[in-house]
Image (tube, rainbow, N blue to C red):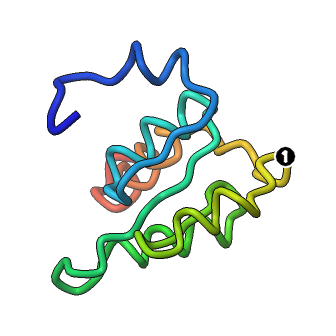
Amino acid sequence: FRFKDSLAEELQSADLVISHAGAGSCLEALEKGKPLIVVINEKLMDNHQLELAKQLHRDGCVLYCNCSTLVETLQSMNLSALKPFPPGQPEKFASFLDKVLGLQ
């Protein structure tokens, strides 16, 4: 798709997600527990997608590649080696903010 308001239905039925490395796209797929290959757009300013993809890869949650290495990545991938993405802990962030703001 070029654009769709929500990919919830497609993600629910997916066995594998291949996506660009936008933070929202990555997190949505990972929160649904789907194996994810992120394809870096190296032409973006500051190449911020690469930073996110590398960190998620270091954490063991995703595979990443660029357009020219996608086929190779698909042929050599081991999805069973991927770790589940840890659930968010918003209460920790809220507690941090309370301390910083002197509310605690």
Residue at image point 32% right, 45% down:
24
Left or right of 80 on screen, residue 49: left
Residues 84 and 20: in front is 20
Where residue 54 sits, quadrant-wise, is: bottom right
Where residue 45 sits, quadrant-wise, is: bottom left
Residue at image point 35% right, 54% down:
23
Q: Residues within 10 Å of mark 1 (few under 14, many from 20)?
A: few
What residue is disc 1 on?
80
Residue at image point 55% right, 40% down:
30
Vertical relation: 15 (above or below) 29: above
Q: Position of residue 56 (x, y in %)?
A: 57, 63
Quadrant showing the N terminus: top left
Q: Position of residue 96 (x, y in %)?
A: 44, 55
Residue at image point 72% right, 42% down:
84
Vertical relation: 50 (above or below) 10: below
Q: Secondary structure at mark 1?
A: helix
Residues 96 and 90: in front is 90
Name of the residue lying farthest toward the right: 80
Q: Position of residue 64 (x, y in %)?
A: 55, 66
How many numbered marks appear? Answer: 1
Residues 92 and 88: in front is 88
Left or right of 98 on screen, residue 44: left
| Three-letter amino acid code at the position of disc 1 | Ser
Vertical relation: 18 (above or below) 42: above
Q: Position of residue 63 (x, y in %)?
A: 62, 61
Where residue 99 sits, quadrant-wise, is: bottom left
